[in-house]
Amino acid sequence: MRVEPTAKRVRAYLGGHPVADTTRALLVWESPHYPTYYLPLADVTATLTATGATSHSPSRGEGVVHTVGAGGRTAAEAALTYPDSPIEELRGHVRLEWSAMDAWFEEDEEVYVHARDPYTRVDILPSSRRIRVEVDGVTVADSTHAMILFETGLPARYYLPKTDVRIDLLESTDTATRCPYKGTAEYWTVNGRADLAWSYRTPLPESERVAGLIAFYNEKLDVYVDEKLEERPRTQFS
């Protein structure tokens, strides 16, 4: 498990009140996909009440479960401490359940879903390559005006103007997802296949170049780049 400090100021809020405010947070990779914050107990202003429950981790040791209280609100079982962790850096720190808090900030910018990975980069580049998308043999998009989004650890995503997409084959769904780098996405069924396409109406600042464009899951359909069929990637979205 990788543990490293971050220079960012990190704040969490519950009930309109700060739960923690620190410049000494740790980034801890509990999973290979993204890190989570561990915050010094000395920088926590909320009330942490041990529930008597524990949570065992093979790497982190025996975790003590706490309920978090702030601003007249409580978040049940939303905090974990590892007072006797074999990983010395984690002692004296607390892990707050991200979704149990009302808001998180890195410096003065709100952050969504999970802590940002300092080793993840998002590059968005315009491309005149011809991108053609097929679903079950039907061409649903054909464009030479793509924005290609390159995100560390994921296949290239082709974001296409709506004018180059068969909108008549798209049907809006209730699905929505959030990304800490791009924002909130809306989804479409494509030619009868659910949630194959998505778009960010108002992406976060670093991803503004894909605003209003439509992307498709490379893993689930056929993408031709300059009329060459790309191999379908295998990812957690396959």
Image: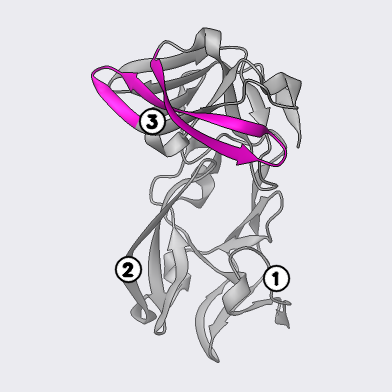
Which of labels 3 and 2 is toward the front? 3
Secondary element at tag 3: loop
What type is the residue that disc 2 sits on?
A: Thr
Confirm whether the magenta stretch covers residue 68. Answer: yes
Q: Quadrant of the N terminus?
A: top right
Which residue lies most toward the bottom here? 137
* Along the line of sight, the residue nearer the viewer: 182 or 160: 182
Magenta span: chief secondary structure: strand
Which of labels 3 and 1 is toward the front? 3
Residue segment shown in magenta: 46-75
Q: Which residue is mark 2?
A: 173
Q: CA distance from mark 3 to mark 2?
A: 27 Å
* Along the line of sight, the residue nearer the viewer: 58 or 138: 58
Which residue lies most toward the front here? 52
Q: Position of residue 79 (x, y in %)?
A: 47, 28
Residue at screen point 38% across, 51% down: 201
* Along the line of sight, the residue nearer the viewer: 90 or 103: 90
Residue at screen point 38% across, 81% down: 169
Q: Which residue is mark 1?
A: 233
Q: Is residue 228 above or below residue 86?
A: below
Q: CA distance from mark 1 to mark 2?
A: 24 Å
> Circles 3 and 2: CB distance less than 8 Å?
no
Confirm whether the magenta stretch covers residue 29. Answer: no
Q: Which mark is residue 83?
A: none
Secondary element at tag 2: strand
Looking at the image, residue 42 sits to the left or right of residue 101; the answer is right
Looking at the image, residue 230 sits to the left or right of residue 63; the answer is right
